[in-house]
Amino acid sequence: MDTVACNFRGRIREYNSAFAFTSLYHLQGPLQPQPNNTPAFAQLYFYDPTYAAHARYTAHPRLDSDVLHRLTTMLQNVNPYIAIYKTARERLEAVSQSESDVRVVLNPQLRLIMETGADR
């Protein structure tokens, strides 16, 4: 079996943690990191994939940096929630300083789609 695949399967929970937006039943953290803090979790989806992969590797040095970069790039290309996060950040940046008490609420919806034969 491929060494990279074995490493990925063996550390799948840590990879999942590295790419988490937030946990269920927890509030989303700030969209922008505090000054002098490294971006983490959902904040990394606003950055260039190379920088985001490096930040994830710094937080999770046991993971394969090439796999982190490939996953980061893939997610930024296919995950629809990243576009929602980017739009939220752009709107936040557009708000004037006098309106600093702003909250962004995202309400993603999960739907069950029943298709005959889709489970085969």
Image: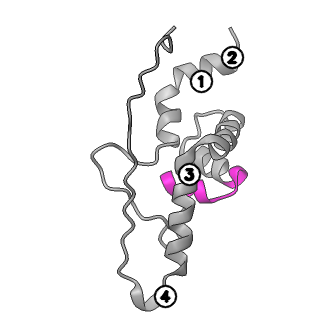
What is the magenta range? 39-51
Q: Mark 2 points at which residue?
A: 3
Q: In this view of the protein, can residue 118 be seen by the observer?
A: yes
Name the spot of residue 97 as percent of width and height, x first. Answer: 46, 89
CB under 8 Å between discs 4 and 3: no
Element at label 3: helix
Rounded to the nearest angstrom, the CA distance separating label 4 from label 2 is 51 Å
Element at label 1: helix
* Residue 118 on the magenta segment: no
**Quadrant of the image occupied by residue 28:** bottom left
Labels 1 and 2: the sequence-earlier one: 2
Element at label 2: helix
Give the vertical position of 63 relative to 29 (above or below): above
Labels 2 and 3: the sequence-earlier one: 2
Q: Mark 4 points at which residue?
A: 96
Q: Name the residue under label 3.
A: 82
- Scheme of image coloration: one colour
Q: Residue furthest bottom?
A: 98
Name the residue located 49 percent from the left edge and 88 percent from the top edge. Answer: 96
Mark 2 or 3, which is nearer the eye?
Answer: 3
Q: Dot 4 surroundings within 10 Å: few (below 14), some, or many (20 or more)?
A: few
Q: Dot 3 surroundings within 10 Å: few (below 14), some, or many (20 or more)?
A: some
Q: Mark 1 points at which residue?
A: 8
Name the residue located 52 percent from the left edge and 58 percent from the top edge. Answer: 85
Name the spot of residue 79 as percent of width and height, x first. Answer: 58, 43
Name the spot of residue 46 as percent of width and height, x first. Answer: 60, 59
Labels 4 and 1: the sequence-earlier one: 1
Rounded to the nearest angstrom, the CA distance separating label 1 from label 2 is 9 Å
